[in-house]
Amino acid sequence: MSLPQFTEIISLSNIEISEAIIETETELFSLRFKKATRQTFQAHEIKYAKRRLAQLKTLLTMRLKELDPKENQNSKDLIPN
């Protein structure tokens, strides 16, 4: 299993991304729980889950910013040149 690639999730819809975020958070919680209770698990899966979660959240944030250009304009007004 290799590290999750950003190109693999670009084709997902916003709803699928939201569902994947919830699923990944649940998986990460389960892995952390296994680690805390000293159950057997693959340690690299925590790293992969964290990376996938970050990628999903980044993509969702980028898409939501594209949908709301008015918000982007307001943030530009707040930053002095």
Image: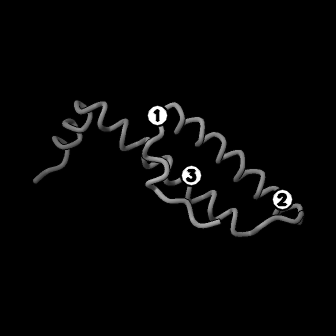
State which tag comes first along the sequence, 2 or 1: 1
SS at badge 2? helix
Q: In this orientation, which residue lies closer to the viewer: 52 or 8?
A: 8
Asked which secondary structure carries label 3, the reply is helix
> Which quarter of the picture shows residue 71?
top left
Q: Looking at the figure, which quarter contains the N terminus? A: bottom right
In the image, which is nearer the foreground, mark 2 or mark 1?
1
Q: Which amino acid does label 3 sit on?
A: Leu
Residue 53, label in figure: 3
Q: What element carries label 1?
A: helix
* Position of residue 32 measured from the top left corner of the image (x, y, whole percent): 76, 58
In the rendered image, the vertical position of residue 25 relative to residue 44, given as above or below: above
What residue is shown with label 1? 14
The span from disc 3 to disc 2 (Cα, nearest Å) is 19 Å
Residue 57, horizontal then vertical, whole percent: 49, 46
Q: Residue furthest left?
A: 81
What's the amino acid at mark 2?
A: Lys
Say which quadrant the C terminus sits in: bottom left
Q: Residue at x 51, y 31 (%)?
A: 15
Dot 1 crowding, Cα within 10 Å, few <14, some 14–19, many 20+: some
Q: Distance of mark 2 from mark 1, alpha carbons?
A: 30 Å
* First along the sequence among labels 3 and 2: 2
The mark that comes first in sequence, 1 or 3, is: 1
Q: Mark 2 points at which residue?
A: 34
What percent of the width, then of the height, locates residue 34?
83, 59
